[in-house]
Every structure is written in C-alpha cells, then in structure tokens.
Amino acid sequence: MKKVLFITGKLAEKGLKTVIQSIENKNFSYEIRNLNVNVAALLTTDMIERRIGDVDGFDEIIIPGRVRGDIKALEMNICKKVTRGPDDLPLLFGAKPVKYDLSKFETSIFGEITDALNMTVDQVIEKAEFFRAEGADVIDVGCLPNKHFPHLEEIVQELKNRNFYVSIDSHNTDELIRGSKAGADYLLSVKSETYHILENLDSYPILIPTDGNLPEFYKLIDRAIDDKLIFIADPILDPISYGFTESLVRYVNLREKYPEIHIMMGLGNITELTHADTSGINMIMLGIIEELKLNHILTTQVSRHCSTVIRETDLARRIIHAASENNLTPKHIN
C-alpha cells in the first residue's frame, strides 16, 4: 500500500485530518506533518526542504496547493515524488468531494418587518411568509415611535394562526403588553424601568441596557435569573464610527460573565448602515457569533443593498457551524 506524507500548517492541520478521514476505501496509508507555520500557503519549497525531516518510507509527498517555489528542485533534493494538493483533496484519490452537513445551525434568525404599522394584515403575512422561506425563524413585528398601531393584535393573531413565532419590537410598554396578550412569543425590548410589565405576561423578554449602563444591565440580568425567567440579553451592537468595536467587547464580556444565558445580536446597525457587500459582512459577523456562542440574530431587509440579508444570514450560520464542527476554516464548504 502506498504511503503518503501530507505537509500542512497549524491552522489547517485539523481540517486536513477531517478531509482525509472522509475518504472512503483509502488505498494508501498516511502521515500528516505540521511544519510549524500558521498558514500552510505561506510555505515555500525551500522551507519545506529545511523542515520536512525524515521522508524514508514515503512514496509521495503532498504539499499545499499554494506553496511557492520550484517543486522539481524539491523532488530532486529529497528524492521523493512531490504533488500539489488541489482544493478538493479527495478528488486526487478518485474519491468524491467532501459534502458538509448544512442542515444544522445553533443561532435563530429574527427577521424584522420594520414598517408593519404601515402595512395591511395581508401584506404583513405575505412578507412574513417570504422571510420564513428565506430562513427567518421568528417574525419581528416593528412598531414606530409615537404612532398608534391599531391592527397590532390582528397581525400577531394571524401570524400565530399560521404557525409563526412572533416578536414585538417596540419601546412602548402599551404595545409590548398588547402584543404579548395577543400571543407574541418575544418582547423586544425590555429595560430596567419596564421590567415590571413582565409580571402578568407570558412572552419571553429581550433585555437591553438603559443608555448603555452596563452595571445596571447586569443587575437586570441577575434579577431575571433570580426570578427564573426565560429571557434573551442584548447589549446592543453599535454602527461603525459610533462605537462598533467597543460594542463587540460588550458581547465578549457578557458571554464571559454569563456563560449559560441566551444572547442576541442585532446586525442591522452594520448591514443597513454600511455600504458594502452584505454577504461578506454577514459571514464575518456570523463567525463572531459562532465563536461567542451567541444564540439569536435580529436582522432587517430595508436598504436596497440589504435585499437578500436573511438568506445570506441563513447560509452563513450553516456554513460557519459546519466549519466549527469539522475544525475547518469556512472555505470550500459551500
């Protein structure tokens, strides 16, 4: 049986092992050798020659596809056959490309209908059905400040009749109470000063800080824990130029302080307020969300450049989860 030596770096080592193990009916034995660089693509043929060590007993050396340098010279110097690995390594051995399970994810998507107040019940239902088809798990009914929402109850009840999970998005306590009594599953958002409304309501609150006061926010979370409430906490993601990086740190600190609670991140402040490709933004943000083990995402599709955000978020959460499960970077998965 042919014996193959695979050369790689630190970041790719676990992923390479996963890919090789996925090859059925292997007609070769192998060893994976990490040459002590973080990114395998930064290796050169000269570095490989210096670091590769003993190659006796191997019939072939497979190196990363983007290695720079003279492979023929490397073959002559180490007296072994050297092959560049393709992107889909199983193809090199006549096997099928690895197919990753994208049915699983660990974050739910709240898709906000921001202008529900200005829509008829039928229009809200139509948009909700579209959002659900795109990947939303919860329909977030947006309310508008200082404007009466006469058909709020009717919208919530009709959504519930069609088996939607529903959240009410308002800073008006009367609207939160009305939505909850109509059957809404979540109330977005509840602060320290409005916490008292939960006493006679069955909906799950999304807790947020008042004016960025984190010590008070932590007290609110502790109170909800003591009251044995089921809740979600959201320290609020700020737009770029308005404290974006600092707000990311809030999520890190919140997760470290409360490793077991459910946490939401609203992505609209980044996708809607940044003129850039939202598919890339969502992929990066879902990577952060996966690493912090956040549980819920609130997103919107308002601006023209955000017209496919829910679908992008749905696919990103699946790709990122597959990458995490298989110890891979999120590349060549879909």
Image: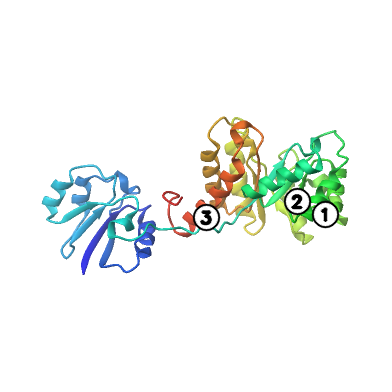
**Label 3: which residue?**
321
Q: Are marks 2 and 3 in contact (CB under 8 Å)?
A: no
Closest to the observer: 123 or 73? 123
Q: Is residue 323 above or below residue 45?
A: below
Q: CA distance from mark 2 to mark 1?
A: 8 Å
Residue 302 makes an appearance in the image? yes
Please name the amino acid that badge 2 sits on. Val
- For the question of whether residue 238 can be seen, the reply is no
Element on which disc 3 rests: helix
* Amino acid type at mark 1: Gly
Report the label total: 3
Question: Of discs 2 and 3, which sits in the foreground?
Answer: 2
**Relative to 26, is 321 above or below?**
above
Q: Secondary structure at mark 1?
A: loop
Per the image, the residue denoted by label 2 is: 166
**What residue did someone put label 1 on?**
183
Crowding at mark 2 (Cα within 10 Å: few <14, some 14-19, many 20+) = many
